[in-house]
Image (tube, rainbow, N blue to C red):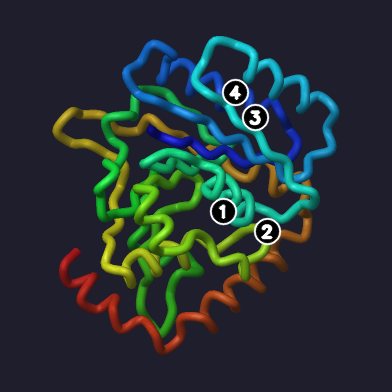
Amino acid sequence: MISVIVPFYNQWQLTHACLMDLYTYIPKESDIKLEVVLVDDASTDVEISGGVAWWQGINYHKVRYIKSEENRGFGYSMNLGAEMAHGDVLVLLSNDVKITGRFLELLPKPDSTYLTGGELLTHDTGWNVIDGKVCPYVNGWLLACSADAWHTVGGFDPGFGRFDAEDIDLSLRFIQNGFTLRQLVDNSSGVRGVFRHLGGQTVYKYYPDRQEYTRVNIEYLRNKWTGKLGFLDNYNMRG
């Protein structure tokens, strides 16, 4: 089973569009057993309950829903969805991602030993350099791994709060635990570029003080990993 976890906060139209993409590219009659886990991060918009009920009522794969009592952010919602998930493979999908093609064949297998996603960053992005080392990471808008790998690493660190830099920390802990990072691209089949991140559709609307969140989280990230990145030397040599 594949579990696709989609957190959201208000702006139901984004989540509905994301679900329509999944409906298009993972149809009901596919051989894949799928569940979609919708994690509502304490939304206030009134149309959401009706929208969720519609998806749960149509003839599609299982759509599960949970609503947090308070707005806790991206990492907390993803962790909550992963706890609910029954799948052997987890796909953590931001609702502001546009899917434009088939992607099932690109996903990790249940026995895989890597974290993959729509964008693997191996250069200085402005906030991933610690102790002079560039920390590679899979961008958090789309992540996929085996459920076993996720639980081994422990999911997102709740110390990062609502958003920003938790994907760098997660990627580092995957590497530290002996896993590798990969780009979700299959050169042999020519399948690439089927995901497009619209970017910041919820964050910039509801959190005008995002820059302060980012500053605090980058400081938290650097304090957490300073002096502890020796394992990256061998990893980067292999890469």
Residue 212 drawn above or below residue 106: below
Q: Earlier in the sequence, mark 1 or mark 2?
A: 1
Q: Quadrant of the C terminus?
A: bottom left
Q: Position of residue 222 (x, y in %)?
A: 52, 80
| In this picture, residue 165 sits left or right of residue 147 | right
Quarter that holds the N terminus:
top left
Q: Are marks 1 and 2 in contact (CB under 8 Å)?
A: no
Secondary structure beneath dot 1 equals helix
- Picture coordinates of residue 108, whole percent (x, y): 29, 42
- Identified at 36% across, 48% down, the residue is 145
Alpha-carbon span between mark 3 and mark 2:
19 Å
Residue 147 locus on image (x, y percent): 39, 49
Which of pointers 3 and 2 lies earlier in the amino acid sequence? 3
**Nearer to us: label 1 or label 2:** 1
Residue situated in front as seen by the camera: 110 or 46:
110
Proximity of marks 4 and 2: CB atoms separated by less than 8 Å: no
Identify the residue at image location x=33%, y=61%. Answer: 122
Q: Which mark is residue 79?
A: 1
Mark 4 falls on what kind of element?
Answer: helix
Which residue position is annotated with label 3?
Answer: 14
Q: CA distance from mark 1 to mark 2?
A: 12 Å
Residue at x 63%, y 49% (from the top left corner): 77
| Circle 1: residue type | Asn
> Label 2: which residue?
162
SS category of the residue bearing label 3: helix
Callout 2 amino acid:
Arg
Would you name the residue on which mark 4 appears?
A: 17
The one of 206 and 5 positioned closer to us in this rendering = 5
Is residue 38 shown above or below 133? above
Q: Do the numbered discs 3 and 4 sit on residues whose CB atoms are within 8 Å?
A: yes
**Circle 2 SS class:** loop
Q: Amino acid at mark 3?
A: Leu
